[in-house]
Amino acid sequence: MLQSSTISYKDYLFKLDKHKARIQALLGSYFDDRSRGKSHAILDFLVEYYSFRRSHLLSWSPGIGIKIESDESNQQPEGNFWIHNGSNYEVNSEALNPKKLQGLRWNLSLLEAIDQREARFQCRGMHEWAMVYATKEQRHSTLDLRLSRKQIDDFVRSQPLGCSHIDAFRFFTEQARPLNKFQPKRETQIEHDQAGCIHVNMDLYKWAYKAWPFISSDLIADSLELALEARVLDMQASPYDLRAYHLDPVRIETEEGRKEYEHSQRALSERADPLRKQLILAYHELFESLFVVS
């Protein structure tokens, strides 16, 4: 049973400052650089694809069920998602319209299916290679490739492709898609996603912020931290040259590199598992607070 509680405005300010400092530590000068038109081949994905607003990311919400006491000046906490009830502020649940709730139900169904499914670790991080296979174009135009086109194509043809995640597979080249063991679709995502996939574990960030501000911003920051680590591994295992970002490649074109990738993939999956369970619990608590049967 979700219990309602109250924190002081002073504690709120402390948690807000701590949260902002944590996001700053994770992303550094990224947002300032971005405002000056500077791109970042690794971090742009976390901001553009996941598209969680900077102002929302930097706000701190305790989630549903936790109130913030008004201070003497009756100053409202940061953000436009609060309502004032007497002497307290709390997250306004009126934004949870039927369409939003339907989306959150689907998110929870996906998270629970992944949590109950056995993880697989045989993909070898081939997805970025399949995105440049047999084409002269490349996904990341600001980066050079660290191998020739022929070396990339030969390697892709030499390895089984086993990508099960729709949001990686949909960027495969037309020539690479028939080579993949799975043909995932959005309609079958709940059937395909599994906890060994680094994109699935990166997506914990998406399923966390999709429930913002109705779950704790601390959980969103935890999932962002994991997503950032997964994204770095994602690009290290790619055929791109990342020396400009002071990153060494994980050379999956070698047996040693494939073992290194799988070791890191498993470590990320182990870290993601308790985070996914926390997120599932947060969703259930959200529905419980609204008297919604999940």
Image (cartoon, helix red, strand yellow):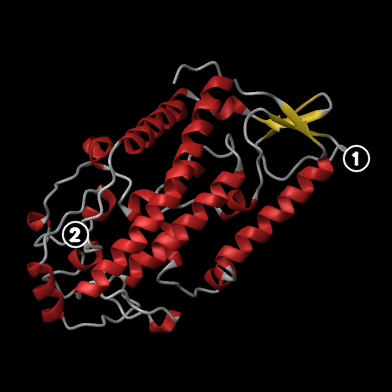
Amino acid at pointer 1 = Ser
Q: Residues within 10 Å of mark 2 (few under 14, many from 20)?
A: many
SS state under label 2: loop
Whether residues under marks 1 and 2 lie with C-beta atoms below 8 angstroms apart, the answer is no
Q: Is residue 30 left or right of residue 176?
A: right
Q: The N terminus appears in which quarter of the rendering? A: top right
Q: The C terminus appears in which quarter of the rendering? A: top left
Count of numbered badges drawn on the protein? 2
Q: Which of labels 1 and 2 is toward the front? A: 2
Q: Residue at x 62, y 35 (%)?
A: 63
Upstream in sequence: badge 1 or badge 2:
1
Q: Residue furthest right?
A: 72
SS state under label 1: loop
The residue where tag 2 is placed is 172
Amino acid at pointer 2 = Phe
Q: Residue at x 82, y 40 (%)?
A: 9
Using the image as rendered, state which of residue 79 and residue 70 is in the foreground. Answer: 70
Q: Residue at x 11, y 80 (%)?
A: 150
Q: Which mark is residue 187?
A: none
Q: Does 74 sit above or below residue 57?
A: above
Residue 99 location, x and y as percent? 43, 27
The residue where tag 1 is placed is 73
Which quadrant would residue 102 be assigned to in this image?
A: top left
Using the image as rendered, state which of residue 250 and residue 169 is in the foreground. Answer: 250
Residue 229 location, x and y as percent? 45, 62
Q: Does 281 sit above or below residue 40?
A: above
Residue 153 location, x and y as percent? 11, 73
Which quadrant would residue 190 be assigned to in this image?
A: top left
